[in-house]
Image: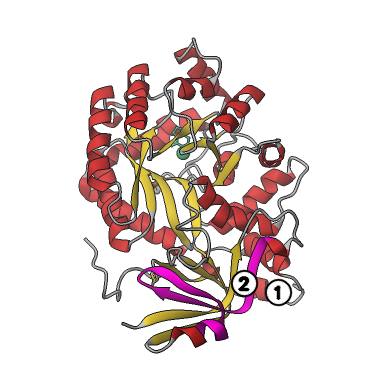
Amino acid sequence: MTRRLLRGRTLTFLRWPETADDLASCRYEEDGGLLFEDGRIADAGSYDAVRGRAGANIEVVDHRPHLLLPGLIDCHVHMPQMQVIGSFGAELLDWLNTYTFPAETQFRDAQHARRIARLFLEEMLRQGTTTVVAYCSVHRQSVEAFFAEANALDMLTIAGKVMMDRNAPDGLLDTAQSGYDDSKALIAQWHGVGRQHYAITPRFAITSSPEQMGAAGALAAEFPDLHIQTHLSENHAEIAYTQELYPWSRDYTDIYAHYGLTGPRSLFGHCIHLSERETDALVQSGSVAVFCPTSNLFLGSGLFPYQPHRRRPKPLRIALATDIGGGTSYSMLRTLDEAYKVIALQGEKLNPLASFWQATLGNAQALSLEDRIGTLDVGSDADVVVLDTGAVPAMRLRMETVTTLAQELFLLQTLGDDRCVVETYVAGKPLKHGIIGQAETSSA
Ligand code: GUN
Ligand code: ZN
């Protein structure tokens, strides 16, 4: 069998980069090689060394002078919200009621769900994102459509059926029992199939009754290895309404903790307005806060305190995400740019090495999946993005003055987007331009 050997400038992170000069935090090869075998990275290092060890039956793909990075990871995104992006003029609760819930209601139609799931994953691949942590809709068929498409593409994904049994239109409600039963059936059907992972997905405390929160907690206890995803502390009106619905709770975080929904596999979208007590509770439980800069800006939700969270004696675990359709770009490069600005508005900076650490190894660690994704280490899944910093004239011009790797990365995040993505490899296969021509894989 022919194996694929990629040649280019390889960059992978080893740990959090303290400064823009902290090159010990990463491994960078000016003329690097990555050997793919059976969907994994079988060898990595200098091109000459990897070529020398590789033997016969090698197809070399020469990506010089482009950068080869681990595929980008998006830790919070809503598949059924592709047609919600750019909906004008509302804050969170109005935005949900006016635009988002009606759009999600359409996913009762399996054909619509399949169409959008396919377009969604293809768009992610066009943007260099190889793993998504996705919310589907309340409808079981939306999750079936999502996983069928992701499995056909061999993408590593985490996704789940939204559980929501109140405060939404009828066409978008399950019940505590049916939400539990459908989630359990989907876990049996999809968790561990290929690269698919199921996430228990109560939308948020406003749209789940106490009975349903209990059912989500029961699932979490039955399936302790599964991820859990929900929303927390995004918007002041949301927080106040949540407090009315759960008057016994100390605060918003306390509600999720009460139902057994905090912990190292729990991903809490937004977490903008947490109190000290709530932040401590998340830190102590090992929970993850997901920073969604374009969405937090677009909906006017607030500024996520990234650096204060990282500076705590025991840092809060943080992931980064687009949050489509509250978010305004599918691109993790655009998302890094907005993250930088959100942090800058709080009088701090995020160095460019740390930015790219966050979108790769940092996000993989937040998902506890760093042994599979987020690095170019030997043994990792062969999910790789190829980036061209000179993709457009304005970037080529600016590149004339760039002298360091950190400067180049900063240019990529400041001016870059899908035009910089030359190729996206998923489990070793080039998929930026879709599955057509991929003889080994068939789509449903
Ligand atoms: N809170 C509950 N549901 C949602 C959603 O779909 N998007 C965002 N941004 N926040 C939410
Ligand atoms: Zn969300």
Q: From the Cβ of disc 2, is ligand 2 less than 8 Å away?
A: no
- Taking the spot 37% from the left edge, 61% from the top edge, the residue there is 122
**How far across and how far down the image is residue 326, in percent?**
49, 42
- 93 shown above or below 416: above
Q: Which colour scheme is used?
A: secondary structure
- Compared across the picture, whether 338 is left or right of 424 comes to right
| First of labels 2, 1 by sequence position | 2
Report the span colored magenta. 25-51
Query: What kind of residue is marked 1?
Result: Met
Residue drawn at 63 percent across, 22 percent down? 277
From this viewpoint, is residue 330 visible? no
Residue of label 2 = 389
Q: In which quarter of the image is residue 201?
A: top left
Instruction: Find disc 1 in the rendering and name its residue.
Output: 399
Q: Residue at x 45, y 44 (%)?
A: 325
- Relative image position of residue 12 (x, y in whole percent): 59, 65
Q: Nearer the viewer, residue 336 or 115?
A: 336
Label 1 near label 2: C-beta < 8 Å? yes
**Is residue 33 a member of the stretch shown in magenta?**
yes
Residue farthest along the bottom direction in this orientation:
56
Q: Main secondary structure of the magenta part?
A: strand
Can you see residue 248? yes
- Quadrant showing the C terminus: bottom left
Question: What residue is drawn where x is 57% and y is 46%?
Answer: 294
